[in-house]
Amino acid sequence: MPKKRLNHKRIESKWQAIWERKQIYSPNIRTPQKPFYNLMMFPYPSAEGLHVGNMYAFTGADIYGRFKRMQGYDVFEPIGLDGFGIHSENYAIKIGEHPVRLAKKTSKRFYEQLHLTGNSYDWTKTLETYDPKYYKWTQWLFVKMFKAGLAYRSLSSVNWCPSCKTVLADEQVIGGKCERCQSSITFKELEQWFFRIATGQRPDSTPYPESLLANLETIDWSNKVKIAQKNWIGKSEGMVIQFPIFNSQSSISVFTTRPDTLNGATFLVASPDSSFLNKILSKDKKQKLSEYKIMYQRNKIKYLGEKGKTGFFTGVYAINPLTGKKIPVWVSDYVLSEYGTGAIMGVPAHDERDREFAENFGIEIVSKEPDRRLWEIIEKENWGQRQVNYHLRDWLISRQRYWGTPIPMIFCQSCATKSKGENAQMPGWYTVPEEDLPVKLPYIEDYRPKGTGVSPLALEPSFYKIRCPSCGGEARRETDVSDTFLDSAWYYLRYPSVGIDDSAWEEEITRKWLPVDMYIGGAEHSVLHLLYSRFIAMALKDMGLINFEEPFSRFYAHGLLIKEGAKMSKSKGNVVVPDEYIKKYGADTLRTYLMFLGPFDAGGDFRDTGIEGMRRFIDRIWSLYSNHRNIVLIKEKDNLEIQIAMHQTIKKVTEDLENLRYNTAISSLMEFVNLLRHKSESGNKKTEGNLPCTTWNEALKTLALLLAPFAPYVTEEIWVEILREKFSIHNQAWPSYNPELIKSEDVEIIVQVDGKLRASLIVKRGKSLVKEEIEKIARNEPRIVNRIEGKKVKNIVFVPGKLINFVLE
């Protein structure tokens, strides 16, 4: 009989249509029996479409969701597009197409590709951040944050990317360069909106950074991600010590983590941006400070975090409260205004940077041993008090771009003059009334950033001119848009409630599905996205809007792909687009190959030769079912060997999938397939008319079930069209294993002759279950040979795994 070849194009289009029509991946959102929220990190779309790195991540997440669905869970696996923000806008500028028009193309392209991959998305619950139906609720969230005292506007020195022409949060600056375009950043003084992630207090007076740290001990995340979060939050325990200014009633506050070295402090150093300097400097020193700050701003990137070599003496002395000595107060660029109080005590005997600074400027170095008793002495003498500081800074929300969520705030100068406003600390500022949301992003042809520190929306009077919601006078709408990380900080909450128009999320639905059970994404987002999402959830919990404060119960960071030894990048021209591979080899082949490359959390090297090998494996599976369906196992040994291997494979694949060890799960499936192919071609019967034996039929069904998460199309075709089982394989129960069949330790078999114990055998458990194997071993056992040699055995009683009894005539 000629072999039936696998036509992947036919079965993929066939099952795509059936799955979507029957909505088998759309759980009942309102009445789930065992809800399981399986989520892949929000993707950035581009007109260039999905690349194989995206598919690697999405496939790994989908496999886990399919596995949980077959374990009996109502799996909710939604998808959407994080389409607002600088990535999309910069690409629009690059190709000269308006982001509004580009968004329509990118969504169409991205969703078409995602359909091809075979992922089990609930296509009834998609969302895009640039859809007013979505960003209405992002604006609503901003309003809630403002009313809770967690949003404020302040003048500050901010990171400025001259290429992207926008401000960047500290987390978006890597090594002094913009994380997106790699341009060296500069600095600007701008009025900006912030969220109090660092300075906010919870209702019980706990600082948010403290909760963010403490909760890391309660969630199932990898250690490397937890460490990244801990390091960024950067908790420091120390003391704030007051250094009196010589011949003055004032003092300088200094934060230090080493109060035990106060005996060696010989100078103080202030950041050029420290606010207290203007109060203590003479006129000529203020001029010196202005000149130094110009130099400092120009060279801040160069010196940031490096050893201090520049600075000037302020002419002011402070008193070391322990020694009573006068010590000089300096200004230097190696001290950051954001650290502690903006001033440090110089202890050159115990700090490398302090020593270098002291040696450079001829400052005294005193060698004294640290003294732990100074912690108590400083408190007792009222020189200072214990304090906890954090590296974490408040979240900078404002962006001077076009393509983003308009910040829903209104400023009235008249009210500001009268000290009126929605918040006493921010006169003149009002939130847009909730009934007026969304504030829609207007279509403007000239959307490109101007580099002037204001958004292009600031040039559109029809957008920013508005009436004050309080006094009715002329007012101005905020023209900055929000950081795209705000869009993605809460999207997981919206997915289950997509289609509900009168609230951001429905309480009852949210209570059933949230928090997310499994969240999969890139480790590169272990600080930015995850930290912001956690903070927003805590704030919403504190407002009584949700009943949990950790959004992702389990987070798994996937690895990254490389292409033939090099990191994939557009500049190198080695980015792989999956479309042609799916067309040539099939989505099942590509999915399985990607997961076989290496551990899912490590990534792997994409090579064309490897995917060809995986297609041959899929073809061998197809051949096993289409050409070796009806097998009757003649030998009991073969029957038992397949049963043992099957149950061992079930156990191994189940454990590997639970721990996302996809490559080793596939290896186990390959071994099982090789065994079945060998048995099908080693003398066992196969005819058109014969029905397969029970073991063979069970083995084929089990193989299909175990393979289904990896290769959804071909297994659906096998299950329904070849095995003639009930649609769909993806809603079938995950197979279970028999522990007795997979024990590999030695067991003792009792050997009897005419019911009397004559010997015992130690054999492997697998052999202990096969009568032919045990009879052969027993007949060659010397103590038995002497008993039965020359005699006729009329019957053999065999109890698998326990005994064999030779009954003589």
Image (spheres, rainbow, N blue to C red):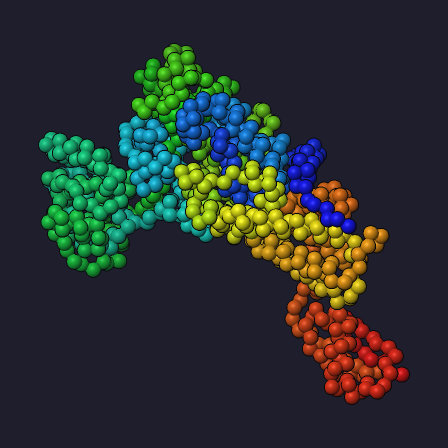
User: Which residue is nearer to you in this view: 242 or 155?
Assistant: 155
Q: Quadrant of the C terminus?
A: bottom right
Res 651 quadrant in image: bottom right
Q: Position of residue 663 (x, y in %)?
A: 56, 53
Relative to 753, residue 514 above or below: above
Relative to 194, residue 701 above or below: below
Q: Position of residue 685 (x, y in %)?
A: 80, 59
From the viewer's perspective, is 46 left or right of 451? right
Q: Residue at x 73, y 72 (%)?
A: 768
Q: How many numbered discs, if any? A: 0
From the viewer's perspective, is 270 left or right of 636? left
User: Which residue is nearer to you in this view: 352 or 109?
Assistant: 109
Q: Position of residue 50 (x, y in %)?
A: 52, 36
From the viewer's perspective, is 431 left or right of 417? right
Q: Residue at x 52, y 26 (%)?
A: 105
Q: Residue at x 75, y 86 (%)?
A: 783
From where the camera sits, is residue 560 visible? no
Identify the residue at the far bottom of this view. Answer: 786
Relative to 511, residue 555 above or below: below
User: Which residue is nearer to you in this view: 142 or 91?
Assistant: 91
Res 312 quadrant in image: top left
Res 484 quadrant in image: top left
